[in-house]
Image (tube, rainbow, N blue to C red):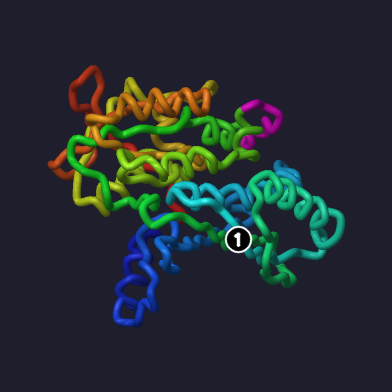
């Protein structure tokens, strides 16, 4: 069973149970309306030693920051402001003292940077490496929430940053080159919190999510939820230094925002984003009515079998 096949089975298994006011599985966060035109959003992410990080290649302080960053990115992808987190961590004996203190220092640094409270969690012993689980909570006006299901044919597809640096950094780390600029990017992602909040307030932005598993996989989530297709021009994918276009499309853990915008307002949106944040929105393609993801090169379809990261 694939990762997403497993998730589909979970959805079917729990479909008959009461939702208790929550919007169910399918977006970066679960949504709970709380009245007065506002909602809370909830997300949880798991990091496991040997799968998501190597302790001998990542400092405890960096990992503390990254554990929080990947969750704040999900909240930002909904157009919401992060307000609180819960942290659960399983520690082996050799990580229970100095390592754990440095981890929490990094977690606190990023919490302070974005004004996020740590309100609970759990700790336990591990017999086989460090495992970290973070639940993040955000808050937004209902009108500002962005979902994967709202893309429309004709929408312009944007990424809010260059892609591929993290994937290139992972390759460096696995090859023992832990001091390269790309390796530092991989270990230290910065969630686009301010950008997500700002884009959430823009009515011309329709669908949005963050790029965690790679453009080739993550864009398909928008297409599936919106019952649409897409054409992506590989020549327009913004490639980070040290990466190539395939890495930019398939490498994971970039944590940049991926969004679609109404075509008549796309140029204005990009100009105002650049003025606000001093960085471009990159148009890479368009949403189509015909299903499927088509890669274009020089304006012509290219039969590329590109896929992002999957856990199993």
Q: Which residue is mark 1?
A: 134
Quarter of the rendering containing residue 247: top left
Q: Residue at the right extreme?
A: 98
Is the stretch drawn in magenta largely helix, strand or loop?
A: loop
Does 153 appear above or below 144?
A: above
The residue nearer to you, when weighing 218 against 200, is: 200
The residue nearer to you, when weighing 287 against 96, is: 287
Q: Position of residue 108 (x, y in %)?
A: 74, 52
| Magenta stretch, residue numbers | 173-181
Q: Position of residue 150 (x, y in %)?
A: 27, 49
Q: Magenta stretch: residue 282 in it?
A: no
Quarter of the rendering containing residue 233: top left
Q: Residue at the front extreme?
A: 36
**Residue 304 visible in the shown view:** yes
Q: Name the residue: 18% across, 22% down.
A: 300
Q: Name the residue: 75% across, 46% down.
A: 61
């Amino acid at each position: 069973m694939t990762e997403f096949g497993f998730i589909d089975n979970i959805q079917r298994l729990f479909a008959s149970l009461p939702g208790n006011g929550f919007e169910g599985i399918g977006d970066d966060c679960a949504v709970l309306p709380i009245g007065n035109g506002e909602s809370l959003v909830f997300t949880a992410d798991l990091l496991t030693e040997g799968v998501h990080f190597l302790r001998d290649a990542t400092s405890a302080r960096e990992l503390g920051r990254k554990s929080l960053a990947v969750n704040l990115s999900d909240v930002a992808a909904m157009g919401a402001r992060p307000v609180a987190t819960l942290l659960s961590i399983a520690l082996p004996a050799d990580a229970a003292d100095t390592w754990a203190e440095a981890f929490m220092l990094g977690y606190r640094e990023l919490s302070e940077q974005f004004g996020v409270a740590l309100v609970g969690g759990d700790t336990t012993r591990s017999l086989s490496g460090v495992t970290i689980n973070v639940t993040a909570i955000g808050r937004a006006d209902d009108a500002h929430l962005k979902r994967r299901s709202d893309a429309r044919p004709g929408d312009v597809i944007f990424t809010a940053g260059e892609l591929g640096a993290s994937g290139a950094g992972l390759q460096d780390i696995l090859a023992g080159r832990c001091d390269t600029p790309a390796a530092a990017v991989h270990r230290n992602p910065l969630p686009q919190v301010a950008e997500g909040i700002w884009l959430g307030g823009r009515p011309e932005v329709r669908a949005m999510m963050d790029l965690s598993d790679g453009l080739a996989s993550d864009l398909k989530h928008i297409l599936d939820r919106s019952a649409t297709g897409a054409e992506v021009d590989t020549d327009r994918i913004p490639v980070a230094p040290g990466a190539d276009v395939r890495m930019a499309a398939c490498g994971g853990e970039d944590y940049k925002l991926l969004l679609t915008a109404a075509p008549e307002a796309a140029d204005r949106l990009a100009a105002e984003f650049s003025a606000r944040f001093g960085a471009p929105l990159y148009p890479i393609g368009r949403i189509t009515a015909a299903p499927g993801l088509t890669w274009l090169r020089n304006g012509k379809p290219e039969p590329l079998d590109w896929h992002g990261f999957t856990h199993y």
